[in-house]
Image: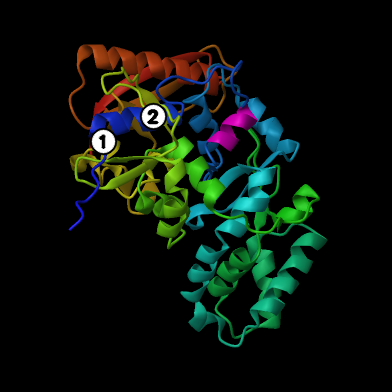
Amino acid sequence: MASKTTYPVLGNRALNRATLQRQLLLRRAPKSAMSVRGAVEHLVGLQAQNVKPPYFALAARMDGFDPEELSALMASREVARLVTMRSTIHMHTAEDCLTLRPLVQAARDRELKQFRAGLAGVDLARLRALSRELVEEEPRTMKKLREALLKEWPDADPLALSVAARCVLPLVQVTPRGLWGRSGQVMLTTAEQWFGRTTEPAPAPDATVLRYLAAFGPASVKDMQIWSGLTRMREVFERLRPRLAVFQDENGVELFDIPDGPRPDAGTPAPPRFLPEFDNLLLSHADRSRLVPEEYRLRTWKGNQAYPTLLVDGYLAGIWRLTEPDDTATATATATVTVQAFGKLTRAQQAAVAEEGERMLSAMSSATAHDIRFETFSG
């Protein structure tokens, strides 16, 4: 009987440091080495369920980040927000909007099947064509789109029609929604209309697997499936195996990596980082223990609400909130970051967290004064 192949073991802290390095969280990317657009591309998109998280995500990852830089990319249609991985809104480059969405279309098709009862009698090809016609005529809110679809199918479930529209079409949230310091309703049009380009055919997943590993690796097949929402990826990894480095974790799970992927020493210092809610760092692995201690796993959510999170020594260590004054032009305007650590921070750790909080506020708030406060975690 042939013996099972054994691979070098990567311990939990080694995986932690490798992932942080890929995520630009061990050392911030200097502007001389990576542009804001390049960071969005390298990270294979940013979680953008809410407007501000992409900005805070890059503030944690890029040296000297100015939110107006990302906002300008949105305004010039070089990046945009639409539903891709895990049926959630992500901010992607224009190229990724036009290729990644077709790649994960199978996951959107599976999602649509969950609403088949509410779509009885609905011709999905007709729904796709009509929805395209409506949102390309002019950007529409989902409410306006749904009302128009209900005229065609009055007996359909309104929620199911909404889900169907966003599943069958790549719908981009148009600006000014998402611009820094501005507001606006969620208005939708197709990616093709927004970028003035046709959606490209779904690419082979091989290149996306390599990009995922470059941004989140080393990782297992299941990790990549969790990140993407795709299934049956084992054959893709097997096809790529000759080109990949292979390891295993402390539980014997096989991990794949690009050969030249950075794998820092497990003892490499990891500075504190303030992350926004829904940050992909914490959502893109089946086994999240490389970043999330088991005892803290359920502390970043309350109902459907997710909290911004704090990393200390590379691991989830607390949550935080930002309170900004209504008028930042006054001499006494103070922006306050309140930290709730899950465990006791040492004096040195607390000082480092306060310094990082000050740095974040300097980049992300126009308030004239800053305050970093610590509270006991309230659950």
Secondary element under disc 1, as helix, strand or loop, is loop
Q: Residue 67, relative to residue 2: is it above or below?
A: above
Q: x and y percent of residue 176 in the render? A: 70, 42
Real-space Cα separation, disc 2 to disc 1, in angstroms: 20 Å
Q: Nearer the viewer, residue 275 or 264?
A: 264
Q: Is residue 375 visible?
A: yes
Q: Amino acid at mark 1?
A: Pro
Q: Residue 51, relative to residue 180: is it above or below?
A: below
Ranked by sequence position, the earlier of labels 2 and 1 is: 1
Q: Quadrant of residue 145?
A: bottom right
Colour scheme used in the picture?
rainbow
Q: Amino acid at mark 2?
A: Leu
Which residues, given as a range, are shown in magenta? 36-42
Secondary element under disc 2, as helix, strand or loop, is helix
* Residue occupying the far front of the picture: 1
Q: Please report the residue visible at 61 percent of the width from the left and 43 percent of the height from the top.
A: 92
Q: Please report the residue visible at 54 percent of the width from the left and 28 percent of the height from the top.
A: 326
Q: Residues within 10 Å of mark 2 (few under 14, many from 20)?
A: many
Q: Quadrant of residue 343?
A: top left
Q: Is residue 185 visible?
A: no
Which residue position holds label 2? 20
Which residue position holds label 1? 8
Q: Quadrant of residue 328?
A: top right
